[in-house]
Image (spheres, rainbow, N blue to C red):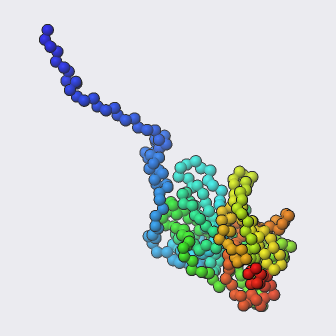
Amino acid sequence: MAPQCPLIQSFFQPSPAAPVPAVTNADENDDGFTTTEVKAFLYSTPHAWKPRVQYEITHIAALAPGPHCVCVLGRVVNFYDQPTSTSKLPYATKRCLNVLLRDDTGMIKVKLWYLKVDYQLRLGQLVSVWTPLISGADTSGSVSIKIQNAACTIDIFPERDNRCYFMVHADKDDGPLSGAPHGYGYDDDKQPSNLTTLKRFIEGGYDVPTAKVLVCVKSIGGRKKFATKKGSVLDVVNVIIFDETYDATLALCGRVATSAAYWKTSNTVLLLANPGFRSDKRSTLSITPNTSVEVDPFFDVESAAKADIRVKFTLAEIDE
C-alpha cells in the first residue's frame, strides 16, 4: 500500500482567533464613538485660553443685550448654585453657578455653566469675563435681580464654547475698582443713601429692599454640615457681625461659606445690601440670591464722617 501524503493544510500555521469586540456604551448607543473617545472630548484638560477675536473692555452699565464681544472686570458680591440638570445624557450640562459681579458702574449676573472645572470663588474676588453675547435680565424663578440694578445677564459655558472664558484673579488683585461701593451714593446734604444701622435694620429696616448695613466681623464660627429638605448637604458658617448699635449673626450657607476663611476678626468690614433676616433666639442675617456683599469697601471717609448716619464702629473698637 502506497504511503499517504500529508494534506496541504497541515503545512499552514493555524490562524489566531479573531478578537471579540468589547461591548461599550458607545456600541450600545450605536453612534460610532467609544466611551473613551466621548470622555476625552467632554472632559479634556483645561488649557490656556487665547481669544481669537478682539474683545472690548466695557463697564457693566454700558452693556446692552445683543451680540458683541466684550470683556467685563468686576468683583464677586454673591454666588450660589443653580439646581442641576436631570438629563441622563453623558454630554448634558451638569451644573450652573450664578455669580453676581459689580464694578464702578453697576452689577450683572453671570450664569456660569460647567462640567468638570470646579470654580473656587469667594466674596470680594476680582474676576474677568469674556463673552460674545449679552442677554437681557434673568427673570426666571422667584429671584428678582432688578433689586441689584442688574439689567443684563451673561450666560457662558467655557468648556463647550471657546468664544467665552471666566478668569479668577487669584494671584493678582489691582485693588478697589471704584472710589465708592456700588449704590453707595450721597444725597445733596452729603448723607449716605440707603445706609442704616444694624439695630434699625433688625427693628424693621429689613422690609426696605434697598437697605444697606455696614458692619465689622466680630468672630467666625466653625464650618458645619446642614441637610436640606431636598436631601442635599450644605456647608454652614455663622459669623458674628457688629456695629456700635447692635451685634447679630450672619449665616453663610452653601458655596459662599468658604469666603469666611479669608476674613479677619475685628478687621474685615462688610457692606451688606438687602440681606435676608429672621429672628429666632438670635437676630440672624443671611445671604439670599438678591443680596450683595462687598468686602472691605473703599468709600469717601470724609463725606461719610459729616453725615448724620455714620459708620457705627470706631478704630479703637476694631483694635480691641
Which residue corresponds to the image point at 35% horizontal and 34% vertical from the top-left?
Answer: 18
Q: Position of residue 92 (x, y in %)?
A: 56, 53
Determine which quarter of the picture holds residue 109: bottom right
Residue 156 appears anywhere in the view: yes
Q: Position of residue 232 (x, y in %)?
A: 69, 53
Which residue corresponds to the image point at 59% horizontal and 71% vertical from the top-left?
Answer: 65
Q: Position of residue 129 (x, y in %)?
A: 55, 71
Residue 211 appears anywhere in the view: no
Q: Nearer the viewer, residue 240 or 102?
A: 240
Determine which quarter of the picture holds residue 155: bottom right
From the viewer's perspective, is 92 left or right of 33?
right
From the viewer's perspective, is 59 left or right of 269?
left
Which residue corresponds to the image point at 54% horizontal and 70% vertical from the top-left?
Answer: 167
Which residue corresponds to the image point at 59% horizontal and 65% vertical from the top-left?
Answer: 120
> Which quarter of the image is occupied by the C terminus?
bottom right
Which residue is at the far top? 1
Determine which quarter of the picture holds residue 270: bottom right
> Which quarter of the image is occupied by the N terminus?
top left
